[in-house]
Amino acid sequence: MNNKAVKLSLYINYFVFAILLNSVGIVILKSQNVYGVDEVDASSLEAFKDFSIMFTSFLIASFLPRIGYKKGMLGALLLVTLGCILMYFGNSFWSAKLLFMLVGIGFGVVKVSVYSAIGLVTENEREHNSLMSSIEGVFMFGIALAYFLFPAFNSEEEPNAWLNVYWLLAGLTLAAFFLLTRAKFDQSYDAPGAGLKEDFLEMIKLIARLLVIVFVLSAFLFVMMEQGIMTWLPTFNQKVMNLPENVAIMMSSVLMISLGIGRLAAGQLTKRFSWVSVLTVCILAAMAIVLFILPKAVNANIEAVETLADVPAIGYAFPLVGLFIAPIYPLLNSVVLSALPKKLHSPMSGLIIIFSALGGTLGSRIIGYLFRELGADQAFSYTLVPMVLLLIVIFVLKRLTDKAGAAQQA
């Protein structure tokens, strides 16, 4: 297997899905401004995305290796191309729900494929940590691009002009499809079980392992925190920072770029430092930003902003939390996958995605509720709760992965 070609295909597919999947925050804002739905109703788009990811991962993870990761990703790209076209012609809140349902289904397949394929092209835990962090970093840059693509098609004179971005996105997914056809995957390893029933049961049995229980709790907590911030940052920028809609959307790219840089940096840091040390420092730094920087941003009283150049420095400060929360998710995923045999990576990837989707949906819903009930100026301060819990959980996870690693070597 040509590892370089396979890695490139993983990067490209993850990048394309990043643009679509995490445009949900932008579409939530547009749904409020164009389709007239309130914050809580708009947050249901997150549920359409995450629950479709969750159910797809649950159903397909156990036997995707038999279908083939390449075939799965090719089908997912075609499905999302269809979703983009339907969104353009549908032009409604319901078509937005359908779009994110299809994107969620496609991403469920792609994420299981990518996470499982990483184990095929890496030899040890440090390589796994590095590649996982790098791929997730590229994912964040894809998200950042979305925050420039959508405003580029926005027009105050023509409310429907923003929908033209979906023709470009459909073209990108088709381009990724044709590039993927050229990559060759080698899946010549033992399947989890002797048949589809056994494969499915293997995934269910994983849930009973203490290591997996602690891990899914940590993944749930992280995604609840990250997705809550990521999804609602455009709304925060407009309602609290008093930024125009286009600028509010583009400013959200600062978070995504920070997340991308943080994950790429983590890929290098984990070559020299233990993952526990990296995550401990990162979580403490993220807590400091929420405690000390966020209140200053809320009280900044920004006025007369027309472009990104007009935004004062404090407007860029809070999104830099992305630098520090960025390494958490890919490192946690890599650590638990590295502690398991490669034949269990596909079912474990399914569980990762399921509980990540649950965390994302709940996080977005909670933040949406807090935005409505307490105000946008207070909502993000509650992200301190999952941060504190994560700090505790990672030390428990460290002990369990050490035991699992020792058991594999015995």
Image (spheres, grey):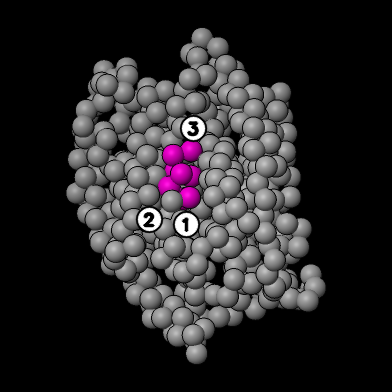
The tag earlier along the polypeptide, 3 or 2, is 3
> Crowdedness of circle 1 by 10 Å Cα count: few (<14), some, many (20+)?
many
Image-based side of 217 in relation to 197, left or right? left
Residue 318 lies, in percent from the top left, at 28, 42
For mark 1, what is the residue?
132
Q: Is residue 335 visible?
A: no
Residue at image coords 55%, 60%: 121
Foreground of the two, 188 or 219: 188
Question: Mark 2: which secondary structure?
Answer: helix
Q: Position of residue 290 (x, y in %)?
A: 26, 50
Look at the magenta stretch and give its main secondary structure: helix
Upstream in sequence: badge 1 or badge 2: 1
Q: Amino acid at mark 1?
A: Met
10 Å neighbourhood of mark 3: few (<14), some, or many (≥20)? many
Question: Does residue 85 appear to the left or right of 132 in the view shown?
Answer: right
Q: Quadrant of residue 257?
A: top left
